[in-house]
Structure formats: C-alpha cells, structure tokens
Amino acid sequence: MPWINKDMCTGCGICIEECPVDAIEQQADGLAEIDEAKCIRCGRCHEVCPQDAVRHDGERIPQQVAANLQWVAHLLDHFEDPKQRDAFLERIVRLFSSHKKVAEQTIEVIKTAGDNPAETIETAIESLTGLQKPQGN
C-alpha cells in the first residue's frame, strides 16, 4: 500500500488531482493522505509526486513486523504456564505460516496470469472455491 511521507510532502496536490479513484485527500495540515480502502494501487501517485513523498509499502515491512511482534508479546501476557506459552507460540507460527502460504499462492497465480489476467484469475477463483461466475446474456 503506498503511503505519504509527511516529512517530504509539500501539499502541492498533484497526487490528489491524478488519483483516478479519489483515494487521496488533503488533510487539515495541508498534506496528502491515501485512503487505503479506496486505493487501487495503480502507482500514478508515485509517478507524479515531485517530492518523492509517495512511498512504497515495502519500506514499512520492519514496522509491520514490529507490530506483529508487539501483538504476539501482548498475547503472551495471557499465558503464565511455559507449556501454554509454547503451545500458543506454535499456534501463532501456524497462523503466520498460513498467511505466508496464502500470499505465496496468490502471487503465483498473478505471476502466471499471462495475456488474459482477468480470465486466469477468475479461473483460479473458480478452481479454489468451486464457484462459477454466472454466465451473462
């Protein structure tokens, strides 16, 4: 998810004007902010920002890992018994492993989507869910 580095944003509004889905708004402080729920990750804001204030989500990986670890540390407070803590940590590892597996399989479908990505993705969805998209008239 792209984000705005508030220390670099000058509030010029170029990204706001260029966003095709109006996912960027000017805040009370004059700086831009991206609405994660609306953003379609098209990259236009990255391309047009003269200050390079629109940043890539990969830069936030360390903060996301730290947030995950803080969450786990908080949950650990509920387990006094070492065996319970160990069992909890095993479950948390399985949780994050499943998230990793979901991401890897999603990436694989996207990477192999070929010349007709919408059809490839729809076929993968049907295969995974057993649901078929209704045929239109």
Image (cartoon, grey):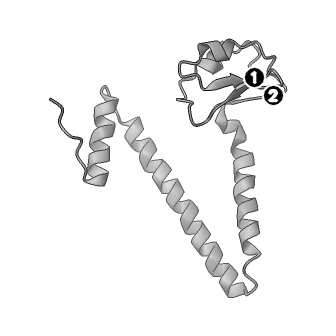
* 72 vs 33: above or below: below
Residue 43 point in image, percent of width and height:
57, 23
Q: Which quarter of the rendered picture does the N terminus lie within?
A: top right
> Of all residues shown, which one is farthest toward the left?
137
Between disc 1 and disc 2, the foreground one is 2
Rendered location of residue 11, percent (x, y):
78, 17
Residue 53: mark in rendering: 1
Depth check: give the residue in front, 61 or 15: 15
Which residue was labeled with disc 2? Answer: 6
**Farthest front residue in view:** 28
Q: Is residue 128 left or right of residue 52?
A: left
Q: Position of residue 70 (x, y in %)?
A: 76, 60
Residue 77 lies in quadrant: bottom right
Quadrant holding the C terminus = top left
User: SS of the residue at dot 1?
Assistant: loop
Q: Earlier in the sequence, mark 1 or mark 2?
A: 2
